[in-house]
Image (cartoon, coloured by chain):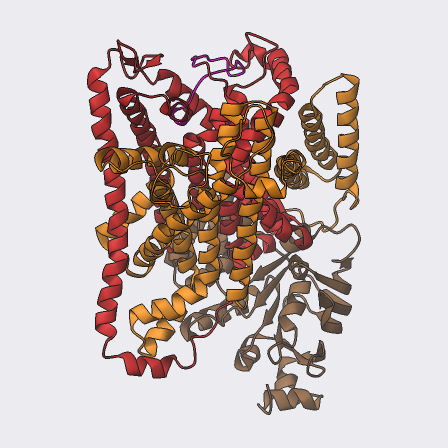
Chain colours: A orange, B red, C brown
Amino acid sequence: MSSTATITDATPPQLGHRLTAARLPRWAPAATAAASIAVGCGIGAAAGLESHVQWGLISALLFLVVSYTLSASVEGRRQARDRFATSLVWVSFVCAVVPLVSLTFYTVQQGIDAISPEFLTHSMKGVVATLSPDGGIYHAIIGTIEQVLLATLIAAPIGLLTAVYLVEYGRGRLASAVTFFVDVMTGVPSVVAGLFILSLWNIALGFEYSGFSGSLALAILMMPVVVRSTEEMLKLVPNELREASYALGVPRWKTILRIVIPTAIGGITTGVMLAVARITGETAPVMMLVFGADFINSDPFNGPQQSLPLYIWQQYSQINNDFGYQRAWGAALVLIAFVMGLNLVARAIARWRSPKGGH
Amino acid sequence: MTSAPPADARGRARRSRGDSRRGDNVFFNLSRGSGVLLLVVMAAIAGFLAYRSLLALGKNEGNFLTTFEWTPDATKPVFGIAVLTFGTLVSAFIAMVIAVPIAVGIALFISHYAPRRIAQPFAYLVDLLAAVPSIVYGLWGVLFLVPHMDGLTSWMDQYLGWTYVFDQSSTGVPPRNLFTVGILLAIMVLPIITAVTREVFRQVPRMHEEAALALGATRWEMIRTAVLPFGRPGIISASMLGLGRALGETIAVATVLSTNSVLSLHLLDPGGGTFAQNIALKFSEAQPLGRDALMASGLVLFVITLLVNGAARMIIARRKEYSGAAA
Amino acid sequence: MAKRIDVSGLSAFYGSTRAIDDISMTIEPRSVTAFIGPSGCGKSTFLRTLNRMHEVIPGARVEGKVLLDDENLYGASVDPVAVRRSVGMVFQRPNPFPTMSIYDNVVAGLKLAGVKKKSVLDGVVERSLQGANLWNEVKDRLNKPGAGLSGGQQQRLCIARAIAVEPEVLLMDEPCSALDPISTLAIEDLIGELKAQFTIVIVTHNMQQAARVSDRTAFFNLAGVGQPGKLIELDDTQRIFSNPSVQATEDYISGRFG
């Protein structure tokens, strides 16, 4: 205890011990928000700003400034900072909601008119697309389903096994190399994957355009996503479970298959689902490798196919008039519904598979 | 939350002890093989693109790095990536500047701020946003967002024009520019960054949050002392995912950006280009040399994303070292 | 510094479930008061109502009054953040901030309160760590992560962190339940020293511990299965363990239930 002697500055730091503090009433944030929006819109309207983006920005800025100053003057700096953070978080929330609502609303509004039984059950074969609103997306639906299914069949098992390798066995340089490159691979842009399959499958090996070559590119995009999400989920499985299983003499691979994976299956499903959702909407690799077709081709291994995203792109960029836009929105609505449906089903499975549902 | 191992595991284990070693071997090799396959694919991507690139670069009569034009199929093939590099980096940068703070905010909203009744459905909605295909974002971007950006663009020109980058040299044209693309990319990468960040925030041990609160921290101070430090590697890793998407986003950019390839520091002027957009637009008409030239630009994009991800990876690794026993 | 706590008519809820019902008691300053009772009897919940940590859990709320000297912690204009600075807390499992060094852990509370001067912070670090009987063990590695210490050291670091902000009251929620016997002994000795300065309330599962460290002991029990927890009696520790006035207390202490 000899070092104690050196302490000279032993004065207490003088913390206030007052319990009460001036507080803004509970309704203050809501009132500030309402007032800011009102004033923001008022300024917007008065200044004749045509875009509502500006109105929103003014309101948000007002809200942040007023929350801070009001709180700082009544409650003090620390509370003001706390309130400012809260306000920022709420503004972020609104920032996320606005485009979501706008996108959904606009897509439904534009797309709903295009959709009819005929639209869903016909291809574009024999339709003069620039001059008529006829034709449909049947061929594109078939193509998308086949391509995504094939890609998932390739990518999901490989991704799952890789994740198991990394979490359960992963030691040493190979594992760290795999971890590193999985991360890098998540960043591989879809066009690059498309170019790669093009140079390997189509140019070097001489295959022609087909749904399957698109699937190969989609699988490359899907694999790292599956690995990453599965890895995260497997890591969350408590070690106690594994140890309990080893202690009962269960071999490692059975522990993984019977205990670890089932425990994490909800999260794994969610991960695979997000990956599927991502690749379903991929346009670029499909554009290069599947090529697109106006007619129905249900054989993914031979000849060009169509796919929904590619169909939208072609209707927008090649037809590029109201007929094209109409069909593009129709297909977009179907594509979104398709992806969301996938989402819902996968989530239902996730919830059903994990009885105690995590959080 | 843990469920106990199945009660009959013991019996099953006894029966299977004989083949457990072989099972372990098979399973180990299978899973390791998958990992190796991923490495092979990555090597193959680099290898094939490099090979095709070399073929193209040998015939290029311009400087690949500094040339603005992209005319590989002309009688005198000239192509360069100056415009593309600039456009790709700038649009991704704008996207990250907007998206990362907002995504962290949304993640905090879901994990710590929102009333429970709102948090869960809202988290779900954000996930749905992630599921919206990029072509739909593109369509929405060009037919809805671009017209609505008019006001904001002229406003920024008026008040922020002095910064040069926000100066608009030609008014009255639709803002199909790098700035709008940046905003669209921000919206697109928001859900993915949010989803990952939110999960990390949720895993912050309650005891660390309570430690901060018990010391007399406000909610924001608790988040700063307990949540954000714990979540930082997660935020970086999430941003990395988002950046990867923004850099390589193809079809949404191809839809929104007007097609004149110019390099201009005026971000509000229409035009410009990105690697991915250029590949998508030029691909269908490309001759064999043009295709190889696009592969060369694809290789550059690949290398850029590789560097970005590698750097982010290293930041995370260093962070883990410091937090030590926290993991 | 140390203040008296007067609780009257306090009930705590999780959502619509009443966890503890109508508790009134007085906790003397500069003494150690132990809460004992069977699992789930609400003693930890009650402890957390004393620094308004209970309401941190979503859906949780409190009714009744807690007077710190004469000020009601649940008064209309009382700031929970200020309450928690005056009433410190040590948790069941050691919880130093994993991303912070030992030094930063100790000064975390002060930094939040806006104390920035290095000389002041240095002084507080040394004084608090000495107060927690940890200084000699860590003085040469103050900049190492707090998470690298042993469990017992981590818990003493948490105590140092709690006393660094100079609270009036120190709440301890089973502070030794995750520790080995030697670390437990170190903490118990420490509690004996700290009571010279602080009002200490400790929840413990271990009746010997309550007998060793506390001046007064409160016994909590469930009114019945699915019923809220209640305070059965509060008395001098010696009396509680030798001659309690309620039969249930004697049954619990002699090991007939719980």
Residue C68: percent from the left, percent from the top? 73, 60
Give the side of residue C107 with respect to residue B274, left or right: right
| Residue B95 in view in this figure | no
Tell me the quarter of the image containing the N terminus of chain A: bottom left
Nearer to the camera, A252 or B259: B259
Residue B129: x, y in percent?
Answer: 56, 42
Q: Where is residue A277 in the image (x, y as percent from the top left)?
A: 48, 46
Q: Which residue lies furthest to the top in this view?
A: B169
* Viewer-side residue, A106 vs C190: A106
Tell me the residue at 55%/44% (across/down).
A121
Asked if the magenta segment contains residue A234, the reply would be: no
Q: Which residue is drawn at 30% across and 24% down?
A: B291
Question: Is residue B269 within the magenta segment?
Answer: yes
Q: In this orientation, which residue lies closer to the viewer: B153 or B240? A: B153
Q: Is residue B110 above or below residue A112?
A: below
Residue at the image position 73 percent from the left and 62 percent from the top: C61
**Residue at (66, 60) in percent of width and height:** C51
The magenta stretch is: B261-276
Quarter placement of the C terminus of chain A: bottom right
Q: Is residue A119 above or below residue C11?
A: above
